[in-house]
Image: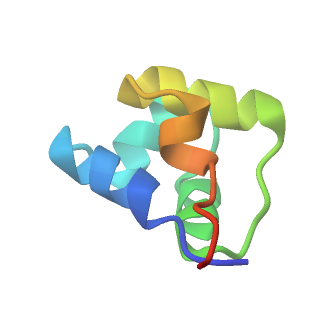
Amino acid sequence: MAKNLKMKAARAALDLSQDELAKKANVTRQTISAVENGDYNPTINLCIAICKALGKTLDELFWEEEQK
C-alpha cells in the first residue's frame, strides 16, 4: 500500500496533529499514522470519518490516480 500523502497534506493544511485528527475521527493516533504511512487499510466508515474531519471527499483523499 502506498503512503497517503493527500491525507497528510490535508491534515497539515488545517494545522491538525495526528492526535487531533484521531480524536475527531474517534480512533487512536497510531491508526491515523498507520493510514498515512500506508500500513493500514481503513474501513469505509473510517475513511468517511477522516473525510468529514478534514472537509474533503473520499475521492480527494483516497482515490488513487491511474499510473500512466
Left/right placement of residue 54 relative to residue 36 reads left
Q: Residue at x 19, y 38 (%)?
A: 14
Left/right placement of residue 9 relative to residue 28 reads left
Left/right placement of residue 8 relative to residue 66 reads left
Q: Find residue 21 and report its image quarter.
A: top left
Q: Position of residue 13 (x, y in %)?
A: 18, 45
Q: Position of residue 47 (x, y in %)?
A: 67, 37
Q: How many marks?
A: 0
Residue farthest along the front direction in this orientation? 68
Q: Position of residue 19 (x, y in %)?
A: 41, 48
Q: Residue at x 79, y 60 (%)?
A: 41
Q: Is residue 17 above or below residue 56?
A: below
Q: Quadrant of the C terminus?
A: bottom right
Q: Position of residue 31 (x, y in %)?
A: 64, 57
Left/right placement of residue 49 relative to residue 44 reads left
Q: Residue at x 25, y 43 (%)?
A: 16
Q: Find residue 65 and report its image quarter.
A: bottom right
